[in-house]
Image (tube, helix red, strand yellow):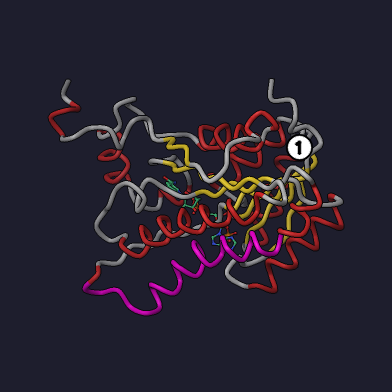
Amino acid sequence: MFTSIAGRAVVVTGATRGIGKGIARVFAGAGARVLIVGRNPGTAKATAAELCAAGAEVSHVLADVGRRDDCERIAATAQERLGGIDILCANAGIFPDARLADMTDEHIDQVLGTNLKGAILSVQACLPALARSGHGRVILTSSITGPITGYPGWAHYGASKAGQLGFMRTAAIELAASRITVNAVLPGNIITEGLAELGGDYEAKMTASVPLGRLGTVEDIGHAALFLATDEAGYITGQTIVVDGGQVLPESLAALEG
Ligand code: NAP
């Protein structure tokens, strides 16, 4: 089962570390050829080398997904190196916190520009190649924060992640004629370098609120993305998969006490 990923050309944005790197590793493990995208030259090179050392065909391109010209360069690089794009995992994102009382235009533009505009620009740039593939797949990394839950400091972030789902639903309809599906994975709290920057106290509190008793791994998200990219998932479009260990389920803290 799920053998359709072997040989497919995959672009993963925000894959120099964290969830994107995990997605790239899972796809590479299934035999895909992967182009990873990020802005940090050192991390990008090291991540591509690490995945190649495990026997995968992985290369990197430096690009800021918030810039249209950079996104077009991502698509051109994929065309040149992989001969096209079958799957786009639009994963790049940032989550700096700012309370509403202190939130500046810069905070709002930075978060919406990367997470929402960046996702739209990535999809737009990859569209011609995805359409040519005949079985194009777009998988967005949204979040439980915004679409389902809220968290102080992340009003702009939540708006960007909920906005991705609004984009997804219309994109799924528009792109259906080109046999491209557009779906989203909604991670809960996943162990990444970005999450670690929020501090040990945050991680401990989050772990305590997850019914399955642990934070997620980047592979947990990679496997959900992989499923949405398979031929077997070809009739699913405009949908979401929550991967959160049950974190959104409890009605109250008392519900977690059993
Ligand atoms: P992370 O560890 O901070 O990694 C973020 C990745 O995105 C890095 O590879 C970074 O690479 C890249 N990136 C950031 N801005 C970019 C830009 N403008 N252009 C291109 N690449 C960019 O974060 P993460 O925890 O893996 O999160 C990844 C995604 O999952 C985000 O969309 C986030 O919102 C979502 N998510 C995460 C969690 C979680 O618990 N970790 C939960 C829900 C949703 P460079 O620094 O090299 O640019």
Q: Which residues are magenta?
A: 101-126
Q: How many marks?
A: 1
> Which of these two is toward me, 146 or 33?
146
- Horizontal and vertical percent position of residue 45: 71, 54
> Which of these two is toward me, 24 or 183?
183
User: Looking at numbered disc 1 in the image, what kind of residue is underneath it?
Assistant: Ala
Is the C terminus in the top left, top right, bottom left or bottom right quadrant?
top left
For disc 1, the marked residue is 32
Q: Is residue 129 above or below residue 206?
A: below
Q: Tell me: 204 left or right of 52.
A: left
Is the N terminus in the top left, top right, bottom left or bottom right quadrant?
top right
Residue that protrudes farthest toward the bottom in the picture: 105
At label 1, counting other C-alpha atoms closer than 10 Å, the crowd grade (few under 14, some 14-19, many 20 or more) is: many
Residue at (33%, 49%) from the top-left corner? 199
The answer to which quarter of the image holds residue 50 is top right
Q: Is label 1's Cβ within 8 Å of ligand 1?
A: no
> Which of these two is toward me, 97 or 159?
159
Q: Is residue 105 magenta?
A: yes
Residue at (71%, 31%) from the top-left corner? 29
Residue at (49%, 63%) from the top-left corner? 116
Residue that protrudes farthest toward the left in the picture: 254
Q: Is residue 146 magenta?
A: no
Magenta stretch: dominant secondary structure: helix
- Horizontal and vertical percent position of residue 67: 62, 72
- Horizontal and vertical percent position of residue 18: 53, 46
Looking at the rendered structure, the secondary structure element under dot 1 is loop
- Horizontal and vertical percent position of residue 75: 75, 61
Q: Is residue 40 above or below residue 36?
A: below
> Which of these two is toward me, 244 or 173?
173
